[in-house]
């Protein structure tokens, strides 16, 4: 159940990130630094999702789940900070996804292997 | 063996360059933004994307080295990182953005070379997935 929720949250973050990056030309008409930062938000979501895909496949590996946990906590904090700076509906949706991902991700277990 | 070590050194150098530049970039945030804003969130997220990219490379190299799919995700992420470096340099053609691109390139080439060194990635996108 938890692993299915994790998979759903991961795919939803991939979708959100792809839509975010695809929206770049509609928002920016010229190349400037804020465009690169905006694309960086989408890439951050994609990289976090990739890390979660790997953690889901190797949930017994303590090193991977630790990296994943650290990234998910940072992602959830980022999403919370985003609500404070921009309390728009899409910020709440993003926060829901990032926090859901952090809560449903595989945790590093004591018995898992360390590589 | 020596070539493998070279690629590993390149990968680590890429990570170190990116991490150092990320810290420098993050330290400039209070100077560039006097108040909380949506642009500050975008700015910080660029740093987080570098952190997650480094985590991804470390997780694959030290945790899932014998499996193909994580390496493929890692190469895709590194390619996207290089694209971000190019976009960043095109948007702001200043000397400080050259080491950023060098860091992304070093990480991508080092990781790919390291993967090739394991003998798995000889025909990365063509061969099947023998070690799922």
Image: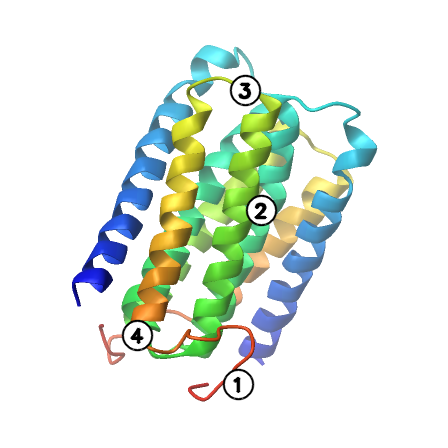
Identify the secondary structure beneath mark 4: loop
The disc placed on residue B128 is: 1
Quadrant position of residue A38? top right
Going from N to C along the chain, the mark reached first, 4 or 1, is 4
Alpha-carbon span between mark 2 and mark 1: 27 Å
Disc 2 from disc 3: Cα separation: 21 Å
Mark sitting earlier along the chain (3/4): 3
Left or right for B2, reference B42: left
Identify the residue position indicated by label 3 in the image.
B93
Look at 64% across and 53% down and name the residue there. Answer: A96
Disc number placed over residue B118 in the picture, else none: 4
Q: Which numbered marker is on residue A43?
A: 2
Do tag 4 and tag 1 residues touch (Cβ < 8 Å)?
Answer: no
Distance (Cα) linking label 4 and label 2: 28 Å
Let me know if residue A66 appears in the view: no
Camera-side residue of A95 and B120: B120
Q: Residue at x 36, y 38 (%)?
A: B18
The alpha-carbon separation of the residues under discs 1 and 3 comes to 41 Å
Given this view, does label 4 or label 2 mark the residue nearer the observer? 4
Q: Nearer the viewer, mark 2 or mark 3?
A: 3
- The correct choice, above or below, for A67 with respect to B29 in the image is below
Front residue (pair A88, A50)? A50
Q: Residue furthest left?
A: B2
Secondary structure found at label 1? loop
Q: Which of B105 and A104 lies nearest the eye of the viewer?
A: B105
Kindly report which numbered mark, 2 or 1, lies closer to the viewer in this rendering.
1
């Amino acid at each position: 159940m938890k692993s299915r929720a994790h998979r759903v949250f991961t795919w939803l973050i991939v979708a959100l990130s792809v839509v975010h990056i695809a929206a770049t030309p509609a928002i920016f008409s010229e190349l400037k630094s804020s465009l690169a930062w905006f694309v960086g938000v989408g890439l951050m979501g994609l990289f976090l999702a990739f890390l979660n895909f790997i953690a889901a496949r190797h949930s017994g590996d303590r090193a991977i789940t630790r990296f994943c946990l650290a990234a998910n906590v940072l992602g959830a904090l980022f999403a919370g900070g985003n609500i404070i700076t921009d309390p728009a509906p899409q910020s709440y949706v993003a926060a829901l996804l990032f926090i859901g991902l952090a809560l449903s991700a595989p945790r590093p277990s004591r018995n898992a292997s360390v590589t | 063996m020596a070539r493998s070590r070279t690629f590993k050194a390149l990968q680590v150098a890429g990570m170190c360059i990116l991490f150092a530049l990320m810290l420098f970039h993050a330290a400039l945030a209070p100077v560039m933004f006097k108040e909380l804003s949506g642009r500050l969130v975008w700015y910080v997220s660029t740093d987080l994307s570098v952190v997650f990219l480094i985590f991804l490379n470390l997780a694959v190299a030290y945790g899932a080295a014998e499996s193909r799919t994580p390496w493929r995700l890692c190469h895709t992420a590194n390619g996207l990182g290089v694209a971000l470096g190019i976009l960043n340099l095109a948007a702001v053609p200043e000397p400080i953005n050259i080491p950023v691109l060098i860091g992304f390139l070093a990480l991508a080439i080092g990781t790919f070379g390291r993967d090739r060194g394991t003998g798995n990635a000889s025909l990365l996108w063509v061969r099947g997935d023998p070690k799922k």
